[in-house]
Image (cartoon, rainbow, N blue to C red):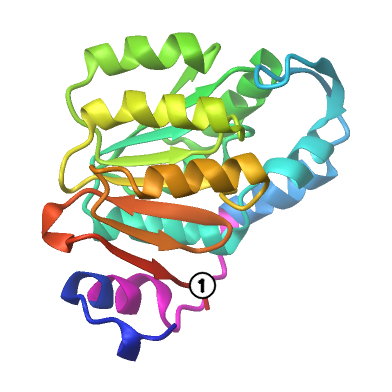
């Protein structure tokens, strides 16, 4: 895929400004934090609401398994800038690195959801270290905290779903979120090709009547809701 094969003015401009020929090094301060997390052998008590399993894991192990790569974290920030997003929601805080990337957009308010208490505490420590004041962490089972949050907020601009990577929760969270999306919203679903059930969820959501455009970046899928896009779908890669 290159810009010459994109006929939509919106997607052409989006591709050129956020995807094509971008050299992404990440944000130095945040990438130093990534390095520190990947070396941190502190043990946490981890509860996975998706599987119902719990146990001890090191911060380094959690970081290696869950941190968004720098090229995607910086791309998400570029996309938030491009879409002029003000209200940002992240399902799945993990250790807070992607939250901190998104919070670099000073005009945005970032609401991030984390189910595990010990992981949430590490993320809060990282937020305090950064000095960022535009992040609010909402702790608890997302099945319970998300409906309450949505009842109190009329509209969302930018959503990153990176929490429960199973078919049922992915569909359920999407259905909740669509009630607060508008034509300029963008929604990202992480790990769309991780498993057969995530493939199924991505295909079903992409074909939803409220989705008018989508991009498959293999690691994640991006959805757009502007009827003017007229059901356009692309497969891209970050360069």
Say left or right for 235 vs 232. Answer: right
Residue range of the region highlighted in magenta in the rendering = 13-29
| Residue 86 showing in the rendered view | yes
Task: Judge whether residue 22 is colored magenta.
Answer: yes
Specify the quadrant that holds the N terminus.
Answer: bottom left
Residue 149 lies, in percent from the top left, at: 33, 15
Residue under the image location 57 percent in, 70 percent down: 25
Measured along the vertical axis of the image, is residue 230 above or below residue 198? Answer: below
Measured along the vertical axis of the image, is residue 118 above or below residue 234? Answer: above
Measured along the vertical axis of the image, is residue 193 above or below residue 108? Answer: below
Residue under the image location 25 percent in, 12 percent down: 151
Measured along the vertical axis of the image, is residue 30 above or below residue 173? Answer: below
Residue tagged 1? 238
Residue 72 lies, in percent from the top left, at: 53, 59
| Residue 111 showing in the rendered view | no
Q: Nearer the viewer, residue 157 or 44?
A: 157
> Element at badge 1?
loop
Residue 109 lies, in percent from the top left, at: 30, 34
Residue under the image location 24 percent in, 46 percent down: 85
How crowded pointer 1 is (Cα within 10 Å; few <14, some 14-19, many 20+) is rated as some
Q: Residue furthest left?
A: 228
Q: Nearer the viewer, residue 236 or 29?
A: 236
User: Can you tell which quarter of the image residue 222 is in?
Assistant: bottom left
């Amino acid at each position: 895929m290159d810009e010459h094969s994109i006929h939509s003015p919106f997607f052409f401009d989006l591709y050129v400004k956020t995807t094509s020929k971008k050299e992404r090094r990440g944000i130095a301060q945040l990438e130093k934090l990534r390095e520190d997390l990947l070396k941190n052998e502190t043990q946490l008590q981890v509860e996975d609401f998706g599987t119902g399993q719990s146990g001890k894991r090191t911060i380094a192990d959690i970081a290696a398994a869950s941190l968004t790569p720098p090229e995607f974290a910086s791309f998400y920030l570029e996309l938030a800038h491009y879409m002029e997003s003000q209200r940002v929601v992240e399902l799945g805080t993990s250790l807070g690195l992607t939250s901190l990337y998104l919070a670099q957009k000073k005009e945005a308010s970032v609401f991030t959801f984390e189910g595990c208490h010990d992981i949430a505490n590490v993320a809060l420590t990282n937020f305090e270290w950064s000095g960022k004041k535009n992040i609010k962490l909402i702790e608890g089972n997302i099945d319970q905290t998300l409906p309450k949050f949505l009842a109190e907020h009329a509209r969302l601009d930018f959503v990153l779903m990176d929490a429960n990577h199973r078919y049922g929760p992915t569909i359920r969270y999407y259905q909740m979120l669509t009630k607060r999306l508008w034509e300029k919203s963008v929604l990202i679903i992480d790990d769309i090709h991780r498993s057969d059930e995530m493939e199924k969820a991505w295909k079903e959501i992409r074909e939803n009547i409220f989705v008018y455009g989508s991009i498959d970046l293999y690691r994640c899928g991006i959805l757009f809701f502007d009827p003017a896009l007229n059901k356009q779908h692309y497969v891209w890669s970050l360069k």
